């Protein structure tokens, strides 16, 4: 018997759906606080030394954190080829903006302290802000569009036609999701500054992080109300579907209707843990930032990020990319996956290497741990960012 047949095809699809969620959460939890600190940079630091304090709290680990973004993109490409093809084609300009911003950010890290000229450093500091704020906003806008449904069609040969434009991506609901994403990462960045920075930078980070935590609760609740009220319609499969089927999104029937994104919570009540984590984590982060329980604050902000992202994934299951103009062409966990052998081989590699990546990451953080303050910058002036 072939080895991969020991695991059912439908089980492998579920495993890779969960792993994709883990990779996206890993990216948001790790590189998320980097983006949060970059977004907060103009507000928490007034002098050059203060800005260097903020930058150097993430300076040693930001490169490794971005690996999660690459892993997520690679997982989409290999495990869900139709999702990769349609999302990267339909969101092409948005992806270009994100990549341009994410290219700008590392350049700013490397060059901002190469010259002592204040205008030179100020320019790169604003580049850091743009390179952090823009991806945080666009990622949220993209999630909002996925919840609304993406305007694509599939013909009988599964060739895709995208009917939207770049500016169609920005609607009131998607902008709400974008602002929620920024607020969530600013909260996470504020918690990180409270944990790693010293002096006035940490104080200001707690202040802005607290405001962002309150905003997360308000926007998350408002977004949920929009879905509950039917303003944002969800999608539902109306025909039988074979979980073991090969990739063919057109082998089903689906419709869009109000309240569909809430159906999973009545069918699987345990899924309520995700939105609860989103709210409780943000409230916990707010309380921790106010009371200066640094470690617990950062854990709470992590849980909030995981909860918000998990809410989207669990609400949509089994959909991963619904179509607003041809609901039956929507991509689901069951009809958009790679072959049985591909998913199994990828799982074997993941089981071997993902724990090694996590262990190495934990070791790096342990070795590089410690507070960063103005005295640290003066001591390490020649090597610090």
Image: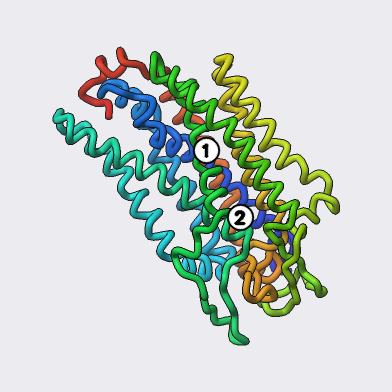
Give the numbered dot on residue 382: none
Q: Nearer the viewer, residue 343 or 103?
A: 103
Q: Position of residue 279 (x, y in %)?
A: 68, 35
Label 1 CA crowd tier, 10 Å (few <14, some 14–19, many 20+): many
Q: Quadrant of residue 318?
A: bottom right
Q: Position of residue 4 (x, y in %)?
A: 68, 64
In the displayed structure, would residue 37 be above or below residue 380? below
Residue at 62%, 56% in the rendered image = 347
Left or right placement of residue 3 versus residue 349 in this view = right
Left or right placement of residue 371 versus residue 140 in this view = left
Q: Quadrant of residue 119?
A: top left
Q: Position of residue 123 (x, y in %)?
A: 23, 38
Residue at 69%, 75% in the rendered image = 328
- Please report contact status of discs 1 and 2: CB closer than 8 Å, yes or no: no
Residue that label 1 marks: 183
Task: Compare marks 1 and 2 and give the one earlier in the sequence.
Answer: 1
Assign a secondary structure to mark 1.
helix
Q: Position of residue 115 (x, y in %)?
A: 15, 32
Left or right placement of residue 356 versus residue 96 in this view = right
Label 2 CA crowd tier, 10 Å (few <14, some 14–19, many 20+): few
Residue that label 2 marks: 348
């Amino acid at each position: 018997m072939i080895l991969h047949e020991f695991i059912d095809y439908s089980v492998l699809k579920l495993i890779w759906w969960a792993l994709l969620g883990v990779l996206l959460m890993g990216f948001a939890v790790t590189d998320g606080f980097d983006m949060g600190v970059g977004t907060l940079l103009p507000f928490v630091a007034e002098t050059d030394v203060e800005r260097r304090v903020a930058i150097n709290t993430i300076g040693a680990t930001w490169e490794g954190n971005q690996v999660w973004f690459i892993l997520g993109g690679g997982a989409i490409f290999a495990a869900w080829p139709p999702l990769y093809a349609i999302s990267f084609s339909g969101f092409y300009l948005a992806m270009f903006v994100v990549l341009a911003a994410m290219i700008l950010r590392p350049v700013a890290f490397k060059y901002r302290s190469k010259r002592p000229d204040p205008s030179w450093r100020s320019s790169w500091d604003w580049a850091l802000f743009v390179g952090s704020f823009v991806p945080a906003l666009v990622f949220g806008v993209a999630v909002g569009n996925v919840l609304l449904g993406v305007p694509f069609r599939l013909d009988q040969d599964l060739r895709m036609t995208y009917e939207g434009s770049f500016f169609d991506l920005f609607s009131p609901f998607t902008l709400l999701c974008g602002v929620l994403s920024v607020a969530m990462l600013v909260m996470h960045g504020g918690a990180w500054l409270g944990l790693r920075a010293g002096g006035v930078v940490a104080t200001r980070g707690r202040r802005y992080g607290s405001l962002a935590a309150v905003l997360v609760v308000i926007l998350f609740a408002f977004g949920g109300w929009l879905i509950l009220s039917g303003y944002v319609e969800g999608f539902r499969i109306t025909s039988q579907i074979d979980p073991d089927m090969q990739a063919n999104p057109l082998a089903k029937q689906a419709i869009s209707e109000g309240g569909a994104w809430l159906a999973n919570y009545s069918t699987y009540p345990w899924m309520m843990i995700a939105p609860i984590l989103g709210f409780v984590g943000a409230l916990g982060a707010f309380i921790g930032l106010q009371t200066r329980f640094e470690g617990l604050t950062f854990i709470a902000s992590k849980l909030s990020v995981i909860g918000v992202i998990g809410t989207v994934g669990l609400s949509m299951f089994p959909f991963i990319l619904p179509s607003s103009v041809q609901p039956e062409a929507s991509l689901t966990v069951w009809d958009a996956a790679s072959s049985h052998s591909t998913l199994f081989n990828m799982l074997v590699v993941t089981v071997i290497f993902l724990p090694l990546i996590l262990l190495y990451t934990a070791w790096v953080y342990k070795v590089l741990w410690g507070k960063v303050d103005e005295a640290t910058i003066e001591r390490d002036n020649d090597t610090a960012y």
